[in-house]
Amino acid sequence: MPPNLIKAKKVELMERHEIVEHVRITLSAVLGREIVELSADVRLLEDLELNSMRFIELLTALEDTLGVEVDPDSLEPEVFQSVDAFVEYVSNRMPQAESGT
């Protein structure tokens, strides 16, 4: 694998990790309890007991802090299934840095 592709892949993983950490911290604030660890397969509704009002708070906080652009029409049920699906949703809606390509 060319070095530039390896570097890009490492940055991508780091960015995803940062998003997961930001979601964890924001979830802790929204739920009023510390979330020590947040694995990809944690279910937002069932495992974390995140209700619809708390989910809106979470989205609003992420809009404010990460610049995520939430389109209510894009909130499919799959987004709520797991942390992994939610982080993917957030990642796809974050402002993108300009690339040199």
Image (spheres, grey):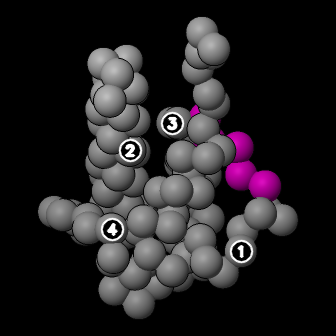
What is the C-alpha distance between the residues marked 1 and 3? 22 Å
From the top left corner, tell me how far across and down residue 15 is, in percent. 38, 36
Q: Amino acid at mark 4?
A: Ala
Up/down of 81 relative to 26, above or below: below
Up/down of 82 relative to 84, above or below: below
Instruction: Judge depth for marks 4 and 3 and give the one in front.
Output: 4
* Magenta stretch in the rendered image: 67-71
Q: Residues within 10 Å of mark 2 (few under 14, many from 20)?
A: some
Asked whether the beta carbons under mark 2 and mark 4 sit within 8 Å of each other, the answer is no
Is residue 99 shown left or right of residue 32? right
| Residue at numbered disc 1 | 76
Q: Amino acid at mark 2?
A: Arg
Instruction: Judge depth for marks 2 and 3 and give the one in front.
Output: 2
Q: Residue furthest right?
A: 73
Q: Quadrant of residue 3?
A: top left
Q: First in sequence, mark 1 or 3: give its number.
A: 3
From the top left corner, tell me how far across and down residue 25 is, in percent. 31, 51
From the top left corner, tell me how far across and down residue 52 is, in percent. 60, 78
Q: Quadrant of residue 30?
A: bottom left
* Residue found 38% across the figure and 44% down from its top: 16
Total residue callouts: 4
Instruction: Judge depth for marks 1 and 3 and give the one in front.
Output: 1
Q: First in sequence, mark 4 or 3: give its number.
A: 4
Q: Amino acid at mark 1?
A: Glu
Q: Residues within 10 Å of mark 3 (few under 14, many from 20)?
A: few
| Residue at numbered disc 3 | 65
* Residue found 41% across the figure and 68% down from its top: 83
What is the C-alpha distance between the residues marked 2 and 3? 16 Å
Residue 34 visible here = yes
The C terminus appears in which quarter of the rendering?
A: top right
| Residue at numbered disc 2 | 16
